[in-house]
Image (tube, grey):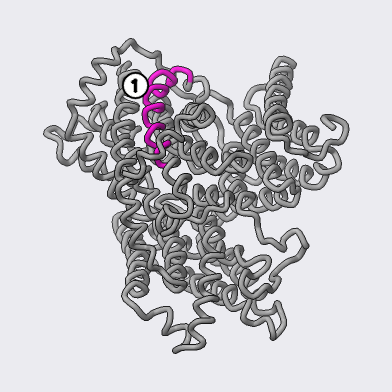
């Protein structure tokens, strides 16, 4: 569990606003300046808002409220990183492995890894049944009814 | 009475089938804790891409109204509001269930939702053309301010912090500038050719609303919940009692309408304000919180009465009245329909069929709601790991199906993961989404205004001259001031 401090909001907003400000002002040629007027204005406003956020964080009253009802929440990275890795692997391999195959694997992984029941054969069979049934429904809906062509691989060419 | 001309369109076989499926599906989705109306509508938008504009909007509209009402099922049976709009319902709905009166509470909930919903849709029917006629005179500078107003209002009201809301709104506006500039034709921030057309709205909508929800579901542990048996309760006696509670129904409906008309306010505020009002005006306020039916009646009539009026500013000015209405705006845009003053001229059939279907949806919601609540108990019990898997798969296939583009899926998953991360710092999705949707409108009108203004007194003078411009600037400032004031007041209360 990662607990962010209140001041981390400033860091995150400064990082985002700074990056967008840099991209807005250091992209495009001098002839294209008109087209960058709007993003430049918006990123400048974001930096100004960040300054106000910084000022707000300096106020004792605000800090007192944050102590009682925080608006910054802990990130349970230890619990979520497997799902994050699963999604990342999906993004890398789904197109080559095929949509139905890779989403079934992703669904099964989420269903089994995050199950609150103990891993038993009956639970495994239940998960396989639920995933297969749902993916069958998705196949009927998208491929048969809506005629959406997804990357196929081995199954559902 | 133009709306009467289009009722026939609603009663075709296909449209009625979509309406029934949307309403029943919405009730079940709403009942599932963690599936908010906004996320349900966002997940369904890709499906509507394969339908006609009327069918797509009928689907989204019916799901919107039904999820708000369906959220009360888990609020009453589990003490977990299915949607933020049902928070106030928990206060007396759950104590009623504890007294073995869960069926009675569900009866009150659906009957009140129906009454509030019908009144709200009637307001939508009669108010919308009036406002649309007024908005016909808008020029580029007004449209620019309308877009900024939409982002500002959602940013200040949806987020707990005005500054974080404004930051999120600006982030959405910036993201909308990726791709070709519509007026000058210059390519900006395009790291890969797939981004030439900008970020796909559907990918952004689904990613920003659905993926953070998946992570949230996986993060939390399932709580052990009480399970109540459904008692026998005559529907006729519930109907009789419900209609006798005129005060609760009136307060709920009026508060819902007023809150709905305020852009950005949403059902949560409607439910809580009406609950507070009925409690204050009751002869015995001590009964509230212990299973007082008036609490359920006022809260549920308010959150459904809010639905219709929240669409008035959306359909006439492109300013959504709630986060879900902001998502509906995305649904309109993918069908090439830009809501605004001339919507009822250029797309009269689509607009009126949609509004009429919302009225019919209230009746379907009442009938199915009363009988489906038993079935919804099983949906409520769906384990979180399966729910997360289902949302992920639907989000992936739905996003892909819009343009058959895997890049959209990557954008959706990346934006969703990014949203989950920044939500931990108190930033919310609705202002970002609205920024992405209204960004092109704001920028195009800003550039057009600049071209016109360059031949006159300059852009600043052009944008701040005229009564209408000043009024909209005033509302923007007022909404920021109100947001800051409310925040300041909360700080004082908490200390």
Occupied quadrant, residue A155: top right
Residue in the image at 70% along x and 33% along y = A142
Which percent across, then down, holds residue A70? Answer: 45, 53
Q: Judge from the rendering whether residue B384 lies leftward or rightward of residue B346; answer left or right.
A: right
Q: Nearer the viewer, residue B32 or B229?
A: B32
A31 is higher (above) or lower (below) than B114: below
Which percent across, then down, holds residue B303? Answer: 34, 40
User: Magenta region, mostly helix, strand or loop?
Assistant: helix
Q: Judge from the rendering whether residue B339 lies leftward or rightward of residue B213; answer left or right.
A: left
User: Label 1, on which residue?
Assistant: B97
Q: Judge from the rendering whether residue A91 lies leftward or rightward of residue A44; answer left or right.
A: right
Tell me the SS state at disc 1.
Answer: helix
Residue in the image at 56% along x and 61% along y = B172
Residue in the image at 50% along x and 88% along y = B455
Q: Nearer the viewer, residue A64 or B373?
A: B373
| Visible residue check, residue B28 | no
Q: Judge from the rendering whether residue A41 lies leftward or rightward of residue B314; answer left or right.
A: right
If the image is split into quadrants, where does the C terminus of chain B sit?
A: bottom left
Which percent across, then down, holds residue B404? Answer: 74, 46
Which percent across, then down, holds residue B307? Answer: 37, 42
Outermost residue to the right: A154
Q: Give, as a single range, the part of the protein colored magenta.
A: B355-375
Number of disc labels:
1
Outermost residue to the left: B283
Task: Tell me, yes or no, whether the highlighted magenta stretch contains residue B373.
Answer: yes
| Visible residue check, residue B85 | yes
């Amino acid at each position: 569990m990662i607990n962010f401090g209140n001041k981390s909001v400033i860091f995150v907003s400064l990082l985002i606003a700074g990056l967008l400000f840099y991209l807005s002002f250091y992209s495009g040629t001098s002839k294209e300046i008109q087209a960058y007027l709007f993003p430049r204005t918006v990123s400048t406003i974001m930096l100004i808002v960040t300054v106000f956020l910084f000022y707000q964080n300096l106020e004792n009253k605000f800090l007192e409220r944050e102590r009682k009802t925080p608006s910054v929440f802990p990130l349970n990275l230890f619990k979520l990183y497997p799902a994050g890795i699963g999604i990342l692997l999906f993004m890398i391999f789904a197109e080559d492995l095929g949509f139905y195959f890779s989403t079934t694997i992703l669904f099964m992984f989420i269903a089994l890894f995050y199950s609150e029941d103990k891993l038993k054969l009956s639970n495994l069979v239940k998960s396989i049944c639920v995933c297969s049934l749902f993916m069958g429904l998705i196949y009927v809906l998208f491929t048969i009814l809506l005629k959406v062509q997804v990357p196929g691989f081995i199954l559902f060419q | 009475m133009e709306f009467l001309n289009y009722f026939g369109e609603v009663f075709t076989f296909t449209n009625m089938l979509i309406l029934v499926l949307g309403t029943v599906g919405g009730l079940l989705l709403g009942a599932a804790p963690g599936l908010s109306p906004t996320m349900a509508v966002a997940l369904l938008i890709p499906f509507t891409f394969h339908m006609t504009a009327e069918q797509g909007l009928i689907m989204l509209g019916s799901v919107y109204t039904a999820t708000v009402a369906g959220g009360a099922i888990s609020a009453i049976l589990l003490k977990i509001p299915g949607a933020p709009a049902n928070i106030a319902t928990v206060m007396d709905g759950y104590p009623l269930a504890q007294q073995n009166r869960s069926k009675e509470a569900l009866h009150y909930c659906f009957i009140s939702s129906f009454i509030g919903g019908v009144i709200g849709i009637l307001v939508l029917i009669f108010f919308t053309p009036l406002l649309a006629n007024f908005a016909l005179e808008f020029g580029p500078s007004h449209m620019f301010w309308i877009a900024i107003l939409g982002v500002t209002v959602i940013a200040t009201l949806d987020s707990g912090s005005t500054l974080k809301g404004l930051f999120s709104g600006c982030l959405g506006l910036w993201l909308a500038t990726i791709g070709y500039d519509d007026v000058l034709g210059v390519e900006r921030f395009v790291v890969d050719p797939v981004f030439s057309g900008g970020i796909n709205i559907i990918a952004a909508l689904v990613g920003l609303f659905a993926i953070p929800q998946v992570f949230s579901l996986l993060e939390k542990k399932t709580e052990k919940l009480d399970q109540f048996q459904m008692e026998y309760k005559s529907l006729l006696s519930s109907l009789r009692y419900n209609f006798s509670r005129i005060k609760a129904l009136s307060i709920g409906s009026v508060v819902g309408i007023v809150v709905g008309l305020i852009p950005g306010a949403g059902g949560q505020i409607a439910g809580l304000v009406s609950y507070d009002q009925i409690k204050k005006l009751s002869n015995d306020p001590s009964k509230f919180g212990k299973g007082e039916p008036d609490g359920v009646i006022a809260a549920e009539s308010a959150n459904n009465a809010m639905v219709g009026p929240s669409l008035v500013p959306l359909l006439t000015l492109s300013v959504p009245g709630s986060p879900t209405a902001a998502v509906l705006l995305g649904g309109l845009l993918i069908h090439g329909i830009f809501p605004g003053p001339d919507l009822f001229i250029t797309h009269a059939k689509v607009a009126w069929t949609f509004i009429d279907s919302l009225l019919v949806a209230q009746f379907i919601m009442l009938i199915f709601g009363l009988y489906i609540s038993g079935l919804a108990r099983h949906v409520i019990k769906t384990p979180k790991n399966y729910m997360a898997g289902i949302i992920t798969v639907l989000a992936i296939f739905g996003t892909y199906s819009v343009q058959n583009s895997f890049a959209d899926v990557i954008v959706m998953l990346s934006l969703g993961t990014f949203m989950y991360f920044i939500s931990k710092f108190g930033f919310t999705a609705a202002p970002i989404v609205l920024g992405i949707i209204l960004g092109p409108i704001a920028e195009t009108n800003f550039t057009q205004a600049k071209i016109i203004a360059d031949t006159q007194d300059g852009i600043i003078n052009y944008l701040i001259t005229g009564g209408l411009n000043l009024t909209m600037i005033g509302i923007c400032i007022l909404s920021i001031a109100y947001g800051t004031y409310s925040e300041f007041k909360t700080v004082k209360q908490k200390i």
